[in-house]
Amino acid sequence: MTGAASPADALQLPDWLAHRAATLPHRPALMASATTLSYSALDAAVDAVVAGLQRQGVRPADRVALLLGNGLDFAYLVHAAARFGFAIVPLNTRLTAPELAYQVEDAGARFLVHDGPNHAPADALAAAARELKLLSARTLASGAVPEPEGAGLVRDPSPPEARWPRPPIPTGGFRRLGLSSLHTIVYTSGTTGPPKGVPLSLGNHWWAAIGSALNLGVSPEDRMLVCLPLYHVGGLSALFRGVIYGSPVVLHEEFDASAVNRAIDDEGVTMVSVVALMLRRMLDERGERPYPASLRSVLVGGGPVPETLLRQALACGLPVLQTYGLTESASQAVTLSPEDALRKLGSAGKPLLPVQLRVMIDNREAEPGEVGEICLRGPSITSGYLGEPNLPDGWLPTGDLGWLDEEGYLYVSDRRDDLIISGGENVYPAEVEAVLLAHPSVEEAGVAGLPDPEWGQVPVAFVKLRSGASALAPELLTFCETRLARYKVPRQIRFVESLPRTSSGKLLRRLLRGEQ
Amino acid sequence: MTGAASPADALQLPDWLAHRAATLPHRPALMASATTLSYSALDAAVDAVVAGLQRQGVRPADRVALLLGNGLDFAYLVHAAARFGFAIVPLNTRLTAPELAYQVEDAGARFLVHDGPNHAPADALAAAARELKLLSARTLASGAVPEPEGAGLVRDPSPPEARWPRPPIPTGGFRRLGLSSLHTIVYTSGTTGPPKGVPLSLGNHWWAAIGSALNLGVSPEDRMLVCLPLYHVGGLSALFRGVIYGSPVVLHEEFDASAVNRAIDDEGVTMVSVVALMLRRMLDERGERPYPASLRSVLVGGGPVPETLLRQALACGLPVLQTYGLTESASQAVTLSPEDALRKLGSAGKPLLPVQLRVMIDNREAEPGEVGEICLRGPSITSGYLGEPNLPDGWLPTGDLGWLDEEGYLYVSDRRDDLIISGGENVYPAEVEAVLLAHPSVEEAGVAGLPDPEWGQVPVAFVKLRSGASALAPELLTFCETRLARYKVPRQIRFVESLPRTSSGKLLRRLLRGEQ
């Protein structure tokens, strides 16, 4: 497991999903494509998936990698992990086989659940990894969702007398969830070295959901749309919020601006989380038509929202909440409310209730206006990285730079050292540079994010070739494409005579950005 | 302190009030009489009261009895206790001097804070108790609330640029609250013996607030009306919910049906907690006029709501939520939603998320429909009684009898053994009987609750006089009035030849009720 749990984690709570199934059996829990599952039906489906996993040999302490697109199966496995005690390792489906193999190996996953579209890469992985057992999501979940004629599928979930059998009695016999249980391992990269596994406990997810509830409110009318990938905490966290609040989750397989706009107009969606790029596409697709008042919160994470986009969104009546969060904080940790959006332009807002925030310079707290490293602490923050010791005093140094104004609003001045955010996906220069340096013709490589009107930033590579070597940009790009997810592949290769470095030889990526 | 904390309690969170003051400085926090305090002003007032208490010698581990009516001072002390670490012992202002003296002594209170109307009984207490230091609430809070011309009083709290000085920066330097801290000791009586102190930690209050939020929802538009006494958890808990949710609390000095109706119509009150008697008075005062849709929750505790009253309330569009809770559960533990109100008539509903509920008979869980003892467990439930060992496995045997139906709805069939609930106040027969038995003419005494159209129940005494003794009912009633709070004094004394008892001599109070 992931080392010592924080005291907050030692708590046990009744199984959330079972509790909701007992108290709100007929309320819609999950809507994906044409299927609407009530809490009662979802509860039964998760039980069926747990039974399927047990038959396949999965045990509570196991780690199960998921190579799945957004869909019911992913949601079942998230809740099954909470209930049965195994940890999921959600894999970014855009990664290449070598990238996937590293994460599966590092996390110690013995099982991998895949779906149809990810069948081929899963097979490749299994061939490479010893002792990795492949499980088909469809097979696991077969029987989990009753046929339309059956009892569990609630196409019209409103009638109090639904066809699903009566729920179990909520007595002391409820299964209990230990908040210290490891639930998720998500990989994230640092400034150097390979990606690191971020372990998130059930308690981390619980407290993130509670912090968000106390900031944004919770209403029985809420309906949350997930159009971010579930393999990112931004998408995953909505599944937890749904079951903890008792709100229905509308799950889209992928982001489609017109589908999102339709869900807001016609399906009663009240809350959605997006990145700036998605927000722009939603507005472009929509034109002048205002959004309905029922949409009460549009959380925008994954980097700052450009001012023109923000003004455009506010003009359409969109309640935009800019947020700052990381995998390590199990989603949003700091949020700016819509009423502050223009007054505090560029700010990520204030910390959610369970989160403590400080900005540190050389082991002291920064003064207002002084830039330093953003540090977070609280029960929603990970206890440390996989295989590393726990965080001293629980404070997570995020690697991101920022400052607080006189009123305590956070401004993020730079995501991690030179982190590139392209369309909401994180690209770590060190990871791309390492691939370039593996090419026999490359002597030095530096990668930086350059501004892009569509994607916010795109990665661009600066390469110094070995003396006498010859390589063309297309060749290097092909080299990258076989080793890196597409969004990490540089948009351009620029050949240079030398790279800017400090006297000690450290690459100055900032200067790369200035050099263009 | 109160013995071992549960694991849930070991957690620390940022000081809630300081956090709200930093994130929502200008939002109204507390409205009482003509005064509206913003979170920033309330935060400063609580700091001033903490400083005042320190000057008077109060230390973090102290227990401070409160003999106060509802008002700002009471609220300051509740938040000051959370911040500074002392425990409050809220005293029912309707108790007689001997009743008060017992609680002050048993709780080990070294200080007693009183207000003007409670000056005389406080003096009497201080004369009786050694080492009890009296503090005037007004003196403590002097300077806490700035004058109307000052900076902190927000009469119109809406403008973002209010006059209160800028709040402190919410850095890592926030004070932190330990959820294991003892915060409140409230006295409650059992079937036998003297009243017992129920210790409630900050964690108990926190989890009760979270459980309620996840059941009823939280909205930035919410405004909670407190018209129950703050010395009961039903009133007290709203102060915690207010600061934890960031919702304004409207505090009434006492229950006045027309003032409550006015606050709902004109002051934007969205939530209120009452007992059945209050609900009846609200409806009587109002006549035919429907309630506005902004009122979204009327929690009714303190015993079942009579069917005619419930139908009348629902006909007026009142969203009535029947609840079951005790001092030991830091307010509601089980709640029935309005949509189930008629379908599950007489039920108290289902447990809130953090609460586990079971009905026990002879150490086994009862079957659906079988009556047994209601037991509760969870982080909102007290860890035990003052001076008694902690609860085995954390399960609280409530002493109340009830049963679960097939769908898991709780029906409370009898509050503790023969508990009388009169206008929402608990009257314990054993306590009244003990007073009667202290009279020289009384040989045996039994007290039971008889139905009353106004109060729900009223206590009636059945007395067997000593052979040859003569005492008239008025004399016995006067004897009771000097020793018992008015609501506990029997409405009638009935003289009988014998009292119904078991073969072992145990009084059968149920038969007393049947005998009328």
Image (cartoon, coloured by chain):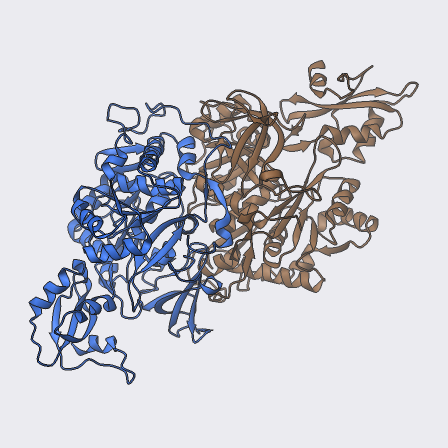
Chain colours: A blue, B brown
**Above or below, comparing residue B432 to residue B462 in the picture:** below
Query: Quadrant of the rendered structure where residue B486 is?
Result: top right
Is residue A497 left or right of A265 when viewed as pictured? left
**Above or below, comparing residue B210 to residue A424 in the picture:** above
How far across and down, in percent of the image, does residue B99 sit?
76, 40
In-front residue for pair A125/A261: A125
**Above or below, comparing residue B470 to residue B84 in the picture:** above
How far across and down, in percent of the image, does residue A219 sit?
39, 41
How far across and down, in percent of the image, does residue B197 sit?
69, 42
**Above or below, comparing residue B281 to residue B265 in the picture:** above
In-front residue for pair B28/A334: A334
Is residue B402 left or right of A185 when viewed as pictured? right
Q: Find the residue positioned furthest to the right.
A: B468
> Could you tell me if residue B247 is visible in this image?
no
> Could you tell me if residue A127 is visible in this image?
yes
Q: Which quarter of the rendered picture does the C terminus of chain B lie within?
A: top right
Determine the residue positioned at 65% across, 33% down.
B425
